[in-house]
Amino acid sequence: MSDYPTFPKWRHNETYLVQTNRKSLIYTAAETYLKPVDPCCPRTVVHPKARIIAEAGPIVIGEGNLIEEQALIINSYPENITPESEVEPKTMTIGMNNVFEVGCVSQALKIGDNNVIESKADVGRNVILTSGCIIGAFCQVNTCEVIPENTVIYGSGCMRRVQTERPQPQTLQLDFLMKILPNYHHLKKTVKAGHNAS
Amino acid sequence: MASLLQPDRVVYLVRGEKRIRAPLSQLYFCRYCSELRSLECVSHEVDSHYCPSCLENMPSAEAKLKKNRCANCFDCPCCMHTLSTRATNIPAPLPDDPTKTAMKKAYYLACGFCRWTSRDVGMADKSVASGGWQEPENPHTQRINKLIEYYQQLAHREKQERDRKKLARRRQCMPLAFSQHTIHVVEKYGLGTRLQRQRSGAPISNLAGLSLKEGEDQKEISIEPAPALDEVEPLPEDCYTRPISLPEVTTLRQRLLQPDFQPAGASQLHPRHKHLLMKRSLRCRKCEHNLSKPEFNPTSIKFKIQLVAVSYIPEVRIMSIPNLRFMKESQVLLTLTNPVENITHVTLAACEEEDPDEINSTAKVMVPSKELVLAGKDAAAEYDELAEPQDFQDDPDVVAFRKSNKIGFFIKVIPQKEEDGDVTVSFKIRHDFRNLAAPIKPSEEGGDTPAEAIWLTHHVELSLGPLAP
């Protein structure tokens, strides 16, 4: 992907193209939410003040995701590499029906389906979440591993256990939000690829 | 700096059976004895039991029957959070027509914190929202109950023999003399249903108690001793070779919370009923007056009687500390707050040489020698704009500022030890206390006498932090 454009550092109030390949998800930082009308990733709701930063590569987000306020999904450069040197951009893939609760930080490169990252949780770059995982509130997972399916990480000591059922997709919540949020927030018209958030 | 307001920085000494140093917020003040009391020199009595999640009150007898557990609420066996009941719709065949299926509600328990559900241990969903969940039976219950009965009877017998001996020896003595003793024996094996909790001070008739129990003594309970086995169950063969799957193994805490079963596998962790909490009242051991009596209602946090020290004794707080240097004099700013509504006069005094209370101080302190006057606490002062500010002649060297019932003053500290620990300073504070609780005796002239002021002295220790590097 040598033709991948380099993006400037995140600036407030700017539109930011997340990724290419016709699966574009365009949004702004302040006071808007965007419902991508593009059929490739429909039914994803991004709350205001959520930040999705594709710094070192594109982010692909599936359908049915719920990204709540002040959540940060960032595909950043690894720490020991300066931005000037040539790095192969890596794609961050996020599957379907995931929930990113308020204030969480996710840098995981691969996230499967039906995961829940609870409030203020911190998921590192080398973690790979499979399906049905729940990262509990305020848990920091910085390990270099693949989290097996249906794992729950909870508690101040990041205890783990396996649950028998995966968390249910939040279809009711998504429908509700898609109806209600446009009534309460200003919507900005997008700059590129002509679809209005409405 | 918020760390200066930490409660442990200023401690008051309580002269009870033990010498206890505690912050004023954790102390009580008995206004009949006019002394500070800490939690260790008062007697604790249980007022009521309640469940912390459903806030249901329970009388003590019922609580004892249910082993101090709530009937409705459950604890997650995995993370000890409170379990909540969730409902799902499952298709179930109608009782009339087996071919048609209707949606029925099925309830299961789930934990919101660790996502444990009752389905994880194989407990079937119940059709009623509450009351359907049963705790598993302990296989040893019968044996344990029998043992308890036997030992209760034994304790009865021992107590009776002891009382008979005492009665024979001291016939004239009031039964009060051994009421204190019987309380300890009664509690030996958890008796107490027949023998009411005896408050010392209430006379009991020992002979009446004996006659009540004679009927019970008729049945003799005998137990078989526990059989000793020669052979123990051997360990499974793959005990050393089988790889451990960590999510399957219970932690020690999870295991020991269920001492009946102590399951080693997570699939055997059943939920338990929630423990009850209790409200307690405190009583001064010397004068038997109540120091703290909470409201009976579990939803109310107020107190019927609340004799806490912060509402009677002036409180010393540290306001600012300069850099403390070894053998150099520094000025520390302290505040004194007056909790009562009348004017209080406070005198500070440094501890004398060879004071038995002064074991912790590592610095010399010079306190102001003049008497400090504190204005009374006026609840309406902030609303009353026309109030004249009271005129106290304050020495600016001693008093830094004055604000309603608070005063800031300086003390001089000279650290004496050059070690790594905190610099601690102690001094005595002497203030006048008007006991408004004691009945005012009518004076001989027939006029109203104001409550007499008595002078109380307290020993205060401050922890001023480490020396500046």
Image (tube, rainbow, N blue to C red):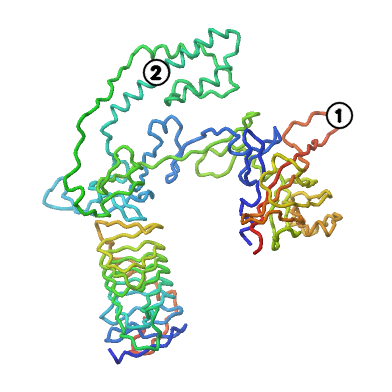
How packed is label 1: few (under 14 Cα within 10 Å), some, or many (20 or more)?
few
Instruction: Looking at the picture, tell me which residue is in the foreground, B249 or B422.
Output: B422
Residue B330 appears in view? no
**Furthest residue to the left?**
B99
Q: Quadrant of residue B447?
A: top right
Instruction: Please identify the quadrant where the C terminus of chain B is shown.
Output: bottom right
Residue annotated with mark 2: B154
Cα separation, mark 2 vs mark 1, equals 63 Å
Q: Amino acid at mark 2?
A: Leu
A77, B453: nearer the viewer: A77
Which part of the image, by quadrant, shows the N terminus of chain B?
bottom right
Disc ID at residue B12: none
Q: Return the residue nearer the eye: B155 or A64.
A: B155
Please state the chain letter of the residue tagged with numbered disc 2 in the rendered image. Answer: B
- For residue B446, the mark is 1
At which x and y percent is residue B280?
A: 53, 37
Q: As shown in the figure, which amino acid type bears the numbered disc 1? A: Gly
What is the x, y in percent for residue A95? 27, 73
> Which of the two labelled residues, at mark 2 and mark 1, occupies the earlier sequence position?
2
